[in-house]
Image (cartoon, helix red, strand yellow):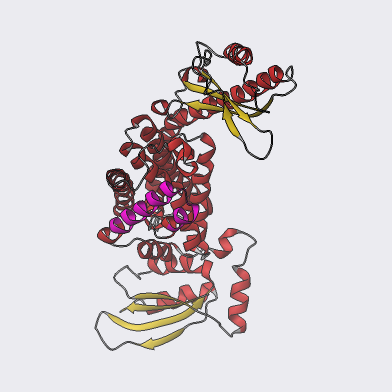
Amino acid sequence: MRHIQVTVPVGKREAVIDVLDEEGVEYVVTEEHSTREYDSVVSFPLPTNAVEPVLDSLQEVGIENESYTVVTDAETVISRDFDELQQEHTTESVQDEEISRQELLTRAEELTPTYSVFFAMTLISSIVATVGLLLDSPAVVVGSMVIAPLIGPALSASIGTVVNDRDLFFRGLRYQFSGVLGGIVIAAIVAWLFQSMFLVPPGAELTEIDEVAERIAPELLLLPVALGAGIAGILSLATGFSVAIVGVMIAAALVPPMAAAGIALAWGMPAAALGSTVLVLVNLLGVNLAGLATLWYIGYRPDSGFGISIAQRRVVKQAAVFLAVILVLSLFLTGVTYSSYQMSSFEETATQESEAVLSEYDDAYLLEVDVQVREEGLPVDSSLDATQQIDAVVVEVGGPPGTYDAELINRLDEQINEQTTGDTAVQVRFVATGGNDAYLEGDEPGVDDAGADT
């Protein structure tokens, strides 16, 4: 429920009262003596979803934006007439919980800090995310999402388009894209400093850090996260649900891949940095597109018929641009997803081939098959066969001491290479598993013909 106070210009009192009577709204009129422009103040309670149509009707009869209109929360209204009014405006839909267009704009403004604060907080969240990714710590990464002030700008652009507020639209886009660029740059600087100060082991490989690896080779399945975040963000803003929780979801789609792109740059992996950057852009545009579509679907419009037609054209145009760019960038993600599928299929095939070879040996058995991809090829290049980007296939074989067998190595090499295009390095590691101690076997020089790791 809302409590409304409106200052009524001189000569408009009767028109305002007629509107309220037609709507069945209870009101109190107070004489106004502070200025000559207004002759009274009208106060009245309204159900939340009735605020926008009633204020629009009052604007049509002379309550301009220059008038003093205040909308506040009302905890309880005790009135039989108000109960009837509330029942008239009650529906079993999202619209029943909607705030007015005027309140929506106010909330968007409240969620968008000044640019200096926004930029500083975004940089801080990117630094924290960089630390969390390098530490492989999900808890720290989640912490970076909590402090990221991204929900306001992410939703402002959509709201500005739907209600025909171009200043709000461009401000939202400026905040978002400058924040993303700044976040990637600061993440690269911080990651480089960590390397220079030896806070990260010199031989550390990004592909071995799970929190980083999943974001430098992004897949198409991550796009629904951004779309869901955009829809949830608008619904939370429009219905009063916890905006802070949804803000974390939007940050989850943007902050970690932003930091991953910076880390990849610091590690000298431009292809991986490109993959993370594409993911950030796809998620950013996905949030905006989902928010735009949700706002228009649930019924938010400008305050005039002429403005509605302009806003409708802009919504269609903006949605088309967002969708076109997302589709183009998604081709990249689709390629990565397909290559990842190929790589997983090859790893499964290599495992089956290895098990088939080892089944002929009584004492040897398969421990693990690890397919290693060249770091400089990340994210996996969809234009190539996935097996052409394999750096090595590591087959770990267990057995009692003395299991090392050069013939076994050659057979594993032949069987696995039959599944690839070109000559793939196959490393066979023999692990003695007899007794309580496990150790590598095969240290004799000159017995690694097939790429055995000795």
Examine the rendering and report whether any part of residue 312 can be seen: no
Up-down relation of residue 314 to residue 299 (above or below): above
Residue at x 46% of width, y 75% of height: 18
Residue at x 62% of width, y 83% of height: 80
In the rendered image, residue 135 lying in the magenta stretch gets the answer yes
Residue at x 48% of width, y 44% of height: 211
Examine the rendering and report whether any part of residue 77 can be seen: yes
- Segment tinted magenta in the rendering: 119-143
Up-down relation of residue 418 to residue 143 (above or below): above
Say left or right for 58 vs 46: left
Q: Could you say where residue 436 lies in the image, as x and y percent from the top left?
A: 67, 40
Depth order, front residue of 237/434: 434
Q: Could you say where residue 86 lies in the image, as x and y percent from the top left?
A: 60, 73
By secondary structure, the bulk of the magenta-drawn segment is best described as helix
Q: Could you say where residue 85 lies in the image, as x and y percent from the top left?
A: 59, 74
Task: Count all numbered tags in the image, as a single digit.
Answer: 0
